[in-house]
Every structure is written in C-alpha cells, then in structure tokens.
Image (tube, helix red, strand yellow):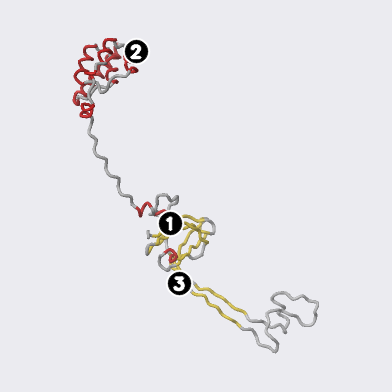
Amino acid sequence: MHSTKIILITAITVLAGAIGLTAAPINFNEVSLWVRARETDKSILTEVSQRKLARALTPQQETTLKSQGASDSLVQSLRSSELVASSAEVAATEPKTSAPKPAPAPEPDRDSAGDNLQVFEVAAGHPVNLSQWGGPDYEFAFNIYRYAGENVIEPVMVDTVRTYTDVAHYVGVLGTGPRTATPYFRGSGRLTPYLGGDLKDDTYMIGDYISVASHSTSRGMSIDRKHPVVINGVPYTLYPIYGARGASLYYIGHSADSVKLAVSTSRR
C-alpha cells in the first residue's frame, strides 16, 4: 500500500509538472488520480481553483470519486460553477492543429492504367499485330520449346516484308484421255480403287496438284524479367516485351501450347 501511494504521488508530481507548463484545465482523470493518491481536500481544491475544471463533473463521476475515497465536502465543493472553466478558456489551452494538407491530385494516367489494359491468350506461333490497338503494324509470335526439361518462351518479331508464301501449280503428264486425280485400274472391275491409285498400272494418269510453301523471317526479341510492371487493380505481374506509338506488349505467363499476354494503350 505504501509503495502504491509513492507511485501515485510520483505520477501526480510528473503530471502536474507537465500540465503546469500549459495550464490546461483539469479533467476528471486528474481529479480521480489525486483522490486515489489520498491528496488532501485542500490541495485538490487549490489546484482546481487555479486551473479550473475542463467541464463540470457528472453524477456518475461524482459517484466514482466517492467510491475512490473522496469526501462529501470535496465533491460538494467541486460542484461550484466558479471552478469550471469557460469554453473560451478551454479553447485557448487546446493545442493548435495545423490546417490539413490538400489531398494530392489524382494521377489519372496511373490510376486508370488498368482500364486501358487488355489481357488475352494466344496460341504458340500465332501472330499478334499491335496495329489493332493503335500501335505500329508489327506482328509478334511466341515459340514454345522444351530445353533441359523446361518450357522456353521465345518471342519474335515477324518480318512482314521478307515473309511470304510460295504457291506452285504442277500439271501432270498429258495423255490421250482426260487428266484426273481419281485412280482407276485396268482389267478387273472387281477391284475397289483407293486414294493414290496403283502406280504399277501404266494407264493411271497423275492429275494436277498444287504445292504451298511458307517462308518466314523473324527477329528474336526478349522478355524483360528484370523490370516487371505492376499496375493498381491488375492481378498480374507484367513483363515488358515491346512498346511504341502508345501501345505496349507484356508477357504474363504460359501453358504448354499458349501464352498469356497483355497490351496497354495510352489514354485517349
């Protein structure tokens, strides 16, 4: 009990010293602390008369003080309106709060970047042209191949000038009969012909056919995995591949035969 009282008195001394610098009105917690520290009624009233109460005590607070050991005469004295500070006195001792800083202007380009982003999947080897998003007329394709047990993604830019398709029309051997691609057989009518015919049958005539060969030229690209891009509201990490004329192409991920990509466009 003795040590508790010493602690309370020490707390009161420190509290009084700190409050004395600002001369702030007394609140209920301070009065309650003095009562629990067994300060005399005279010392409590002296302090209250100098600094005033921040607000009048409520009936519940008076009951609390009495339960803590306050005398009836002390509670009666604290009811005096002369011991209650005016609103002006209370306002004068309140710390001045600085005016709130205006909120920074939103950055529409960054905040709305997710609205200008399109995420899609494309099959391996299938070209993607940035012109449909307002970018340059460049096509990109993604090759997927296995190396050391891992899938390797190889983005390439297709050279539309040097890429072409060669179509050749070949005409078969001319004969007295009409050219046909349908096989038939000499002699027996009991044989059922099959596609490709019987090449031992010298009466078989090879018909016309067309050969189609595609020649493509591409330039290897790279996925920038060292500088990923994160956009608010987009649940993907974007890895840059190419960007020009307000359209940027990003890599997201892949499966066994397709890749997930994203294209962001500048705000219109």
Task: Report the disc number at residue 160.
Answer: 3
- Amino acid beneath label 2: Ser
Q: Give x and y (percent) for residue 19.
A: 22, 24
Q: CA distance from mark 3 to mark 2?
A: 93 Å
Q: Which residue is mark 1?
A: 117
Classify residue 51 as left or right of residue 61: left
Q: Give x and y (percent) for residue 256.
A: 54, 57
Viewport quadrant of the C terminus: bottom left
Q: Say which residue appears at 37% left-offset and 51% top-offset.
A: 111
* Image marks 3 and 2: residues in contact by CB distance under 8 Å: no
Q: Secondary structure at mark 1?
A: strand
Q: Say which residue appears at 24% left-offset and 11% top-offset.
A: 41
Q: Looking at the image, tell me whether mark 1 or mark 3 is earlier in sequence order.
A: 1
Nearer to us in this view, 59 or 188:
59
Q: Nearest to the eye among marks 2 and 1: give it.
A: 2
Q: Say which residue appears at 19% left-offset and 23% top-offset.
A: 20
Q: CA distance from mark 1 to mark 3?
A: 26 Å
Relative vertical location of residue 179 with respect to residue 10 in this rendering, above or below: below
Q: Residues within 10 Å of mark 1 (few under 14, many from 20)?
A: some
Q: Looking at the image, tell me whether mark 2 or mark 1 is earlier in sequence order.
A: 2
Q: Secondary structure at mark 3?
A: loop
- Amino acid beneath label 1: Leu
Q: Quadrant of residue 115?
A: bottom left
Q: Nearest to the eye among marks 1 and 3: give it.
A: 1
Nearer to us in this view, 29 or 216:
29
- Whether residue 129 is visible: yes
Q: Secondary structure at mark 2?
A: helix
Nearer to us in this view, 138 or 67:
67
Q: Looking at the image, tell me whether mark 3 or mark 2 is earlier in sequence order.
A: 2
Q: Which residue is mark 2?
A: 67
Q: Residues within 10 Å of mark 2 (few under 14, many from 20)?
A: few
Nearer to us in this view, 37 or 212:
37
